Image (cartoon, rainbow, N blue to C red):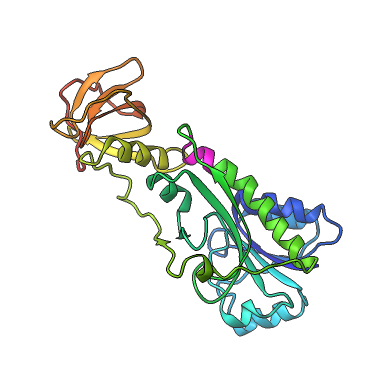
Amino acid sequence: MRIGYFGDGIWAHKAFEKFIRDDTIELVFVTVRYDKRDKVLLELSEKHRIPVELSDNINSPEFIDRMKTYEADLFVSMSFNQIFKREMIDLPKYGTINCHAGKLPFYRGRNILNWALINDEKEFGITVHYMDEGIDTGDIIVQRTYPIGEEDDYGTLLARAYDGCAEVLYQAVERIRNHEVKRIRQADIDPVGTYFGIRCPGDEVVDWKQSSREIFNFIRALCRPGPQAVSWIRGKKIQMNRARMVEGAHVYKSTAGQVIGRTKEGFLIKTGDTMLEVTEYSYEGKIRTGDRLGNHE
């Protein structure tokens, strides 16, 4: 199986290592992101004497002509950032596949692990699918799901996804190589699905009028290595990396965003319904009972 590999990041490194250990797979070239080039993937390619192909437009006639010379059986995309158009998709014998850290046809799009936590999901998925000209809409080859527990956060899900993506992607290539693929149309699972847009600066600001559960999920969804949830006290930014639900907390009306007490690990804050304990945060100053956290400086 001759593979042209388009990749970036730790997931791409882990999948590369699986492919390189399999004598039945040959990586005939590697393409990294043009704007922010993955040094590790470039070093791995050099170590194993695999040609590197770079282009700011992989759909250009020039790049496609170069790709034809490799006679690849399959193109594989793992966290690559360019959209493949029809000519590129159909160039290899077995087409082009993509690994997506989301449960398709739900959770198409970007920043999926963050959104899964924000939406209080009890599991997340990893899907390898054939590419078409839509966004994460092609037929499914392999899909696996992984549980989300109360102690999970963005960091733990990301670590699980790094290994999971490499494993599921390798399984998909094995199925294609062995002619064992049973394609699943996404429309047969759900005719509409869901799509999530990329998170942008400003999306990390907490809305204290939301429920304690919603804010708890929001904080753990944005924890390190993410940007962390943000609010302001007296014009100074506070970044919150971890919070905890308060057992037995009552629903009552009061000022959302107000600090209502100190704890050994942090402080209690009133939410839209009950209260939440913030247990890990960064703030230049002292936080006092009665302080109000707001959504702007």
Q: Is residue 129 above or below residue 114?
A: below
Instruction: Tell me the quarter of the picture where residue 61 sits.
Output: bottom right
Magenta span: predominant SS is helix
Rendered location of residue 26, percent (x, y): 81, 64
Rendered location of residue 168, percent (x, y): 66, 54
Q: Residue at x 52, y 56 (%)?
A: 103
Residue furthest left in the image: 254
Q: Residue at x 19, y 36 (%)?
A: 235
- Report the span colored magenta: 152-157
Residue 155, magenta (yes or no): yes
Please name whichever residue, 179 or 216, is drawn nearer the observer in this view of the structure. Answer: 179
Which image quadrant: the N terminus?
bottom right
Which image quadrant: the C terminus?
top left
Q: Is residue 118 left or right of residue 256?
A: right
Instruction: Tell me the quarter of the picture where residue 20 sits.
Output: bottom right
Rendered location of residue 122, percent (x, y): 47, 43
Q: Is residue 250 above or below residue 141?
A: above
Residue 128, magenta (yes or no): no
Rendered location of residue 94, percent (x, y): 72, 74
Q: Is residue 16 above or below residue 283?
A: below
Q: Is residue 84 left or right of residue 297?
A: right
